[in-house]
């Protein structure tokens, strides 16, 4: 049994601020609120969501089981939230299953069942892998559990209600056929289904890394301002510590720490972030800077970035400023808030690394000169070869930008590390684009934000092995809006998704596609049942055809929450998520990734180097030059 840390998400949060797009045509990252008690994620046990009274959970006395994960989710009790009926069915939507009409007969409760109330599957998974759970939503399933077969094999029923059934895909040969749901009253409905086996290449153990900068003090020049919302009481709130120990935003509060520097070559101002890594760093390193999960280019003072800078190493520095420094990479005209640079230290004997910033992008403070912000610095060193780097890029819309606005303890990489049960550090790159839809999956020469731009930037095509795709909510929402371009987005979603999946595989990468979350239409949530069903069917077909690692099934999770807890994971706009909903995204992405890439088995941990505790340093007696700051 692996030991997991408990992450408590039931805390106040600082919303991620984005430019709000009007007219409701894009899933922008606006803060959301909901009076229902948020979910608390416990990484040690995932208890099942509270079920309705009419629910039958087969083989158990505990509430309904929503998944068969490698880690756990606990749903906090809700108050008196009513289920949102408008998001669970659309009167004009055609069912995906075909009822088998039978004469009137008595069910287990001796009640008459007629063809008029035969079972109907409105939406459900259309592909799956042996041992994975799938969900079926519809009508007239009955409160007494019936049976489900998939390609003729009996499936284990995990949850059965009148409108929702969850089963586990049985051991059956790969192929296409029917899923058949039969009620206790012997009425049946069929649903297309494909079983498949994950491509074994996708499950090969990746090459691991250690973040050798973790917890090591940074030596800073040009620091103007620093802010850290929350840290353990025994640690400093200063940027020289939190840039590498990542404790701002502790307990799941995102976007709560940053350091602002001034660097302006025209004024003779430079900034430096230097770290004594405590070991010889010869060979390849992956250096990551992180400021924000929104991946739009910075073109205004809204968020300033390091524009022009050099990555340097030194064999003889004692304080990050003296000694000899060798330039190993220069970056010009950067406009992204987060970067990942693979560099090579050419010879032995170097232990200091620094980022020498010549220019920020915009003047954002009262002090003259261009500025930039940074929240986290990581320096990854491979524990052996790095042909299959343990690295994950997540490309998504505003739901991604909002939920994954951290790579610290509350972030996805730390969840994956905890689920694996080892100390290997995973490289995590988040690219959230408010309003993004399937057009972002194409090589669009008129865009600088599509996934091909991401592949090209920092040579991530070869430096990042796993590519998570969480796109489709805007496509489903646009399709329901009735605009000409919107219809094109929905109709071409499958073509666009399949093209990028095939291309990533051809490049030796591993794509993982999430099933889009459900929305609350009565609150103005994006999409109708027909549009959502089209997008989900496209995802399921492509996953089966290319034998992909199953991505997280957010549709089943969020629709079940809507039906049983009034949509407590969704905010007032019916599309964006509360902190509890964002926690679910993080938890289940981690679960899907670990289960799919390792078969639920933890990767054998590499020896963990001794990490020096963060010292309490008196600036007056420090061996290095400490540059005092002024807090605005």
Image (cartoon, rainbow, N blue to C red):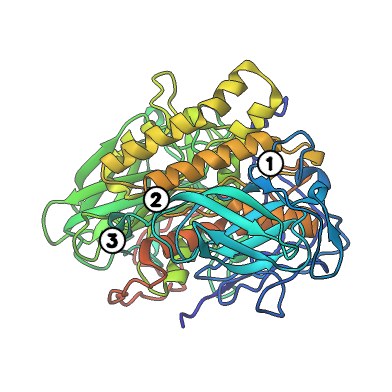
Give the Cα distance between marks 1 and 3: 39 Å
Callouts 1 and 3 close, C-beta under 8 Å: no
> Residue at position x 36%, y 75% from top?
612
| Marks 1, 3: nearer the viewer | 1
Can you tell which mark lies on residue 204? Answer: 3
Callouts 2 and 3 close, C-beta under 8 Å: no
Can you tell which mark lies on residue 548? Answer: 2
243, 560: nearer the viewer? 560
Q: Is residue 241 visible?
A: no
Circle 2: is it few (<14), some (14-19), or many (20+) Cα within 10 Å? many
> Residue at position x 24%, y 66% from top?
383
Q: Which residue is mark 1?
A: 95
Q: SS of the residue at dot 1?
A: loop
588, 418: nearer the viewer? 588
Q: Earlier in the sequence, mark 1 or mark 3?
A: 1
Question: In this view, which residue lies farthest toward the front?
Answer: 103
Give the Cα distance between marks 1 and 2: 27 Å
Query: Compared to 182, does 540 lie above or below?
Result: above
222, 313: nearer the viewer? 313
Query: Compared to 370, does 518 lie above or below?
Result: below
Q: Earlier in the sequence, mark 1 or mark 2?
A: 1
Q: SS of the residue at dot 2?
A: loop
Q: Is residue 214 left or right of residue 519?
A: left
Residue 181, image x, y percentages: 64, 57
Query: Compared to 496, does 125 lie above or below?
Result: below
Circle 1: is it few (<14), some (14-19), or many (20+) Cα within 10 Å? some
Residue 102, image x, y percentages: 73, 52
Query: Compared to 628, does 503 lie above or below?
Result: above
Q: Is residue 196 left or right of residue 579?
A: left
């Amino acid at each position: 049994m692996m030991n997991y840390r408990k992450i408590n998400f039931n805390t106040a949060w600082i919303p991620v601020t984005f430019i709000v797009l009007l007219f409701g045509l894009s899933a922008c990252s606006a803060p959301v609120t909901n009076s229902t008690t948020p979910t608390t994620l416990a990484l040690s046990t995932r208890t099942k969501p509270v079920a309705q009274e009419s629910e039958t959970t087969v083989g158990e006395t505990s509430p309904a089981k929503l998944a068969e994960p490698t880690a756990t989710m606990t749903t906090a009790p809700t108050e008196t939230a009513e289920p949102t009926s408008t998001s669970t069915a659309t009167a004009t939507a055609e069912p995906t299953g075909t009822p088998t009409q039978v004469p009137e007969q008595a069910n287990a409760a001796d009640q008459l069942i007629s063809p008029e109330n035969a079972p109907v599957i409105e939406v459900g998974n259309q592909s799956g892998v042996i041992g994975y759970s799938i969900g079926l939503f519809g009508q007239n399933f009955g409160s007494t559990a019936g049976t489900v077969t998939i390609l003729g094999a009996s499936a284990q029923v995990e949850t059965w209600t009148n409108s929702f059934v969850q089963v586990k895909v049985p051991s059956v040969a790969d192929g296409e056929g029917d899923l058949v749901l039969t009620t206790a009253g012997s009425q049946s409905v069929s649903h297309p289904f494909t079983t498949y086996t994950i491509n074994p290449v996708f499950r090969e153990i990746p090459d691991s890394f250690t973040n050798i900068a973790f917890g090591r003090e940074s030596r800073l020049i040009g620091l103007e301002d620093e802010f850290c919302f929350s840290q353990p009481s025994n640690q400093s709130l200063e940027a020289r510590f939190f840039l590498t120990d990542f404790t701002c935003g502790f307990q799941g509060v995102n976007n709560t720490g940053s350091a602002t520097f001034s660097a302006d070559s025209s004024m003779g101002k430079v900034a430096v972030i230097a770290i004594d890594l405590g070991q010889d760093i010869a060979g390849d390193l992956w250096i990551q800077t992180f400021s924000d999960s929104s991946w739009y280019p910075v073109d205004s003072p809204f968020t300033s970035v390091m524009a022009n800078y050099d990555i340097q190493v030194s064999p003889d520095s004692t304080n990050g400023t003296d000694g000899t420094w060798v330039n190993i990479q220069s970056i010009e005209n950067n406009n992204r808030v987060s970067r990942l640079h693979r560099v090579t230290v050419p010879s032995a004997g170097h232990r200091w690394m620094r980022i020498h910033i010549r220019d920020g992008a915009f003047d954002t403070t009262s002090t003259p000169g261009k500025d930039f912000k940074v929240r986290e610095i990581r320096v990854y060193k491979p524990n052996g070869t790095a042909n299959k780097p343990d690295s994950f890029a997540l490309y998504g819309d505003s739901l991604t930008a909002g939920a994954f606005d951290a790579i610290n303890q509350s972030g996805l990489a730390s969840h994956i590390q905890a689920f694996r049960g080892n100390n290997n550090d995973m490289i995590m790159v988040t690219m959230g684009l408010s309003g993004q839809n399937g057009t972002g999956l194409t090589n669009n020469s008129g865009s600088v934000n599509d996934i091909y731009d991401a592949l090209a930037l920092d040579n991530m095509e070869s430096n990042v092995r796993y590519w998570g795709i969480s796109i489709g909510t805007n496509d489903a929402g646009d399709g329901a809006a009735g605009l000409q371009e919107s219809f094109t987005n929905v109709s071409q979603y499958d073509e666009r998704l399949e093209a990028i999946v095939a291309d990533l595989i051809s490049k030796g990468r591993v794509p993982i596609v999430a099933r889009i979350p459900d929305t609350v239409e009565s609150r103005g949530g994006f999409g109708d049942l027909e549009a959502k069903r089209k997008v989900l069917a496209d995802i399921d077909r492509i996953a089966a055809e290319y034998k992909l690692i199953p991505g997280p099934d957010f549709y089943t999770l969020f629709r079940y929450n809507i039906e049983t807890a009034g949509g407590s994971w969704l905010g007032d706009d019916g599309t964006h998520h509360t902190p509890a909903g964002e926690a679910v995204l993080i938890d289940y992405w981690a679960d899907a990734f670990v289960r799919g890439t390792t078969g639920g088995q933890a990767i054998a941990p590499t020896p963990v180097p001794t990490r020096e505790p963060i010292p309490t340093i008196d600036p007056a007696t420090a061996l290095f030059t400490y540059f005092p700051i002024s807090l605005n």
